[in-house]
Structure formats: C-alpha cells, structure tokens
Image (cartoon, grey):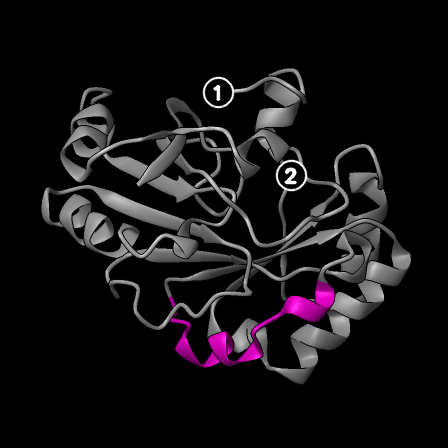
Amino acid sequence: MKVCEIFASIQGESTYAGLPCVFVRLTGCNLRCSYCDTRYAYDEGRDMTEDEIVEAVRSYGFKLVEITGGEPLLQNEVLPLISRLIDSGLRVLIETNGSVNISDVDGRATIIMDVKTPGSGMSETLHAANFEHLKRTDELKLVITSSADYEWAKEIVAKFGLSEKCAVLFSPAYGMIQPSDLSAWILRDRLPVRLNLQLHKYIYHPDQRGV
C-alpha cells in the first residue's frame, strides 16, 4: 500500500473524539473538496507492506486505530489490513468519503462515512447505496459550511432516515461557520444529530501535520 503517514494523536472527530488513536493515512483521493486540509495526501507517500504497517501501528501501544486518507478504500489491499488489525485485538475505524462501495469492509470495523455537502463541491459523488450497508455501530459525518449546507444536510438525513441507521454527526467547517450557529440550528429544528467539533484543530495548529 502507499502510505502518506502513520502517527498517534488525539482523535478529533466522531463519537471517539478525545481518545488516543493511531492514524494510518493512505495516499490518494478521488475527490477534491473545497475545504480539504490534507491535500498533501493526494500524492505524497511511500510503499509499505502490510507487515510494516501493522508493526508501525502496534509500536504506539494504543488500542484504537483509524485508517483514513485521502480515500483509504481506493487501495484494495486495505481490506485484509483492516481484518488483520482487528484480529490482533485493535478497534479499527475507517474514515471514507462516501463515494466508494463500503460493502466489502470487515463488518467488525466502524465505518465513519463523510457525506459530502454542496459546500464541499463534491455532493454529487455520494454513493447513496452505501446507506444500506451501514451498521448501528457505524457513523455518518456531514461537514456544514453554511446555512444552505445545513438545510441540505437536514433533508438528506430525513430522506434516507439516517438517524435511525446509526449516529449522525454535524460538523461546522473550521473557520467557515461558527459552532454556536450550528448548535442553534440543531436545537431549533430538534434534529437527532450530534454536534461534532474537530478537536484536533483546536488543540493543534489547523495546518499542522501528524495530528
């Protein structure tokens, strides 16, 4: 696999936010979101074997691992890696952009699927069939850049009954919308969603790598 970076940090998003986590960031992405903060992962990286990745992950000593990108599911070799990490006693999260089929991912992994809103410029890439493969333990993340994004996201949640499928998280795009505004809209509309701040951007510099 081509790996951009492997590092340990505080999990900044999802219901696992705040926990120590090892991140395996794979190289390559099929989308170009307007607010992307990991553009370096489009091309940067080096080839690593499955054994090398597992050894690097286990060297940190944490039980929580997230495989992310880029878009990690573009590399088919990631599927056996996911199973191997789980078999070794680790809890594995998969952050995916929602445009790639998730049905072949080991069912023991937790999928965190990013549903792209219009503000990302990539909302047309949504592979809605993925919603049928979600488990209760999976999570959906929608990054909100504006009030228009919020209204779109609210309609998507209702149309597909997403809050009945798994946890749904609304994230204010850092520097583009105030968390206080998004929280007020969620409360106003009584939405069954979780406000999800990107903790790592408040802990570290927003442009810092390896966090």
Give the amino acid type for the residue marked by disc 1 in the picture. Answer: Gly
Q: Which residue is mark 1?
A: 210
Q: Secondary structure at mark 2?
A: loop
Side (left or right) of 161 relative to 53? right
Magenta segment: does it hold 142? no
Residue 60 drawn at (x, y percent)? 24, 20
Q: Amino acid at mark 2?
A: Leu
Residue 108 at x, y percent in the picture: 23, 60
According to the image, label 2 marks what residue? Answer: 197
Residue 55 location (% of width, % of height): 16, 27
Is residue 56 in sight in this rendering? yes
Residue bounds of the magenta highlight: 123-136
Using a 10 Å C-alpha cutoff, classify the residue at mark 2 as few (fewer than 14 neighbours), some (14 to 19) or many (20 or more). Answer: many
Q: At x 71% / y 70%, what residue is drawn? A: 124
The N terminus - image quarter:
top left
Of circles 2 and 1, the one toward us is 1
Residue 50: percent from the left, percent from the top?
A: 18, 39
Tell me: 37 left or right of 16: right
